[in-house]
Amino acid sequence: MPSGEEMNRVGAEIRICGEYEPPKRPRPHTSYDRAQQSRHFMIYVHSKIMIVDDECIIIRFANINQRSIDGANDTKIEMGAYQPYRLSTKEPVRGQIHGLHMALWYEHLRKLDKSFLEPESLEFVRKVNQAVEEYWNLYACKSLDNKLLGHLLSYPIGVSSDGEVKELARLEYFSDTKSRVLGPKSGSFLPFSLPKFSNLIV
């Protein structure tokens, strides 16, 4: 596990003497210019990973849905793996897939907790929600005085008990962009049987 000093360097937004600076200033008021000022930006990652009960893993570039995996629409790279000798015991699975699972939590949250061993527990959900909300507040902060250690953020919306989705107060756009948080409404209709969530994690 990294030391405190090493962790402080991860995701740091405070300027460090001698760090790289672009030779030319980007055009003012562009997304690139705003990212240079705030020293952070969002990254779109297209690959997907699915870990099931710490027993098997699928890593792929296609979406994990019927359209993308039935073989008639997309050509993608995919691999699946499991450890058969880990499945013949009643003990909790603690193989390499489990190790990757825990490493991913640390990579995104920069913290580990015993509740991470029971992701179905309410304690786990509360711990993760607390962390991602903290990281979102740091990410969206105008001040550059704090270091953003983790990079898993809560999606900046609120969901009411009756399922209504609203943007957070005074937050119409994602930080440093002109991309709307809620976006336009789709002309498609969603099924009425969709579950309602009180909180969402990205």
Image (cartoon, rainbow, N blue to C red):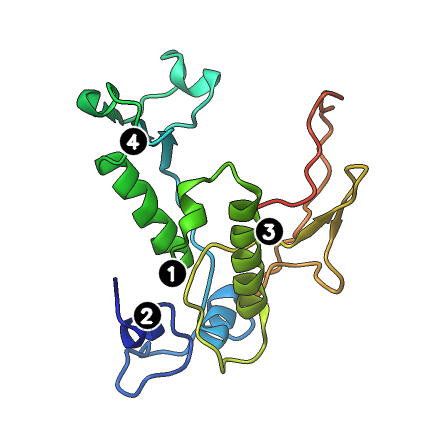
Q: How far apart are marks 2 and 4 (CA)?
A: 29 Å
The residue tagged 4 is 93
Residue 155 is labelled as 3
Q: What's the amino acid at mark 4?
A: Val
Q: How many marks?
A: 4
In this rendering, the answer to whether 29 lies above or below 181 is: below
Q: How far apart are marks 3 and 1 (CA)?
A: 18 Å
Q: Which of marks 3 and 1 is nearer the N terminus?
A: 1
Q: Do the residues labelled 4 and 1 touch (CB within 8 Å)?
A: no
Name the one closer to the observer, 152 or 45: 152
| Label 4 vs label 1, nearer the camera | 4
User: How many residues crowd mark 4 within 10 Å: few (<14), some (14–19), many (20+)?
Assistant: some
Q: Distance between the residues labelled 3 and 2?
A: 24 Å
Residue at 47% across, 69% down: 35
Image position, residue 8 (x, y; %): 35, 74
Secondary-structure class at tag 2: helix
Secondary-structure class at tag 3: loop
In this rendering, the answer to whether 188 lies above or below 17 is: above
Q: Distance between the residues labelled 3 and 4?
A: 31 Å
Q: Distance between the residues labelled 4 and 1?
A: 23 Å
Q: Do the residues labelled 1 and 2 touch (CB within 8 Å)?
A: yes
The residue tagged 1 is 110
The residue tagged 2 is 7
Q: In this view, does 189 lie to the left or right of 156?
A: right
Say which quarter of the image contains residue 76: top left
| Label 3 vs label 1, nearer the camera | 1
Secondary-structure class at tag 1: loop
Residue at 24% across, 18% down: 88
| Label 3 vs label 4, nearer the camera | 4
Secondary-structure class at tag 4: loop
Name the one closer to the observer, 87 or 111: 87
Q: What's the amino acid at mark 3?
A: Tyr
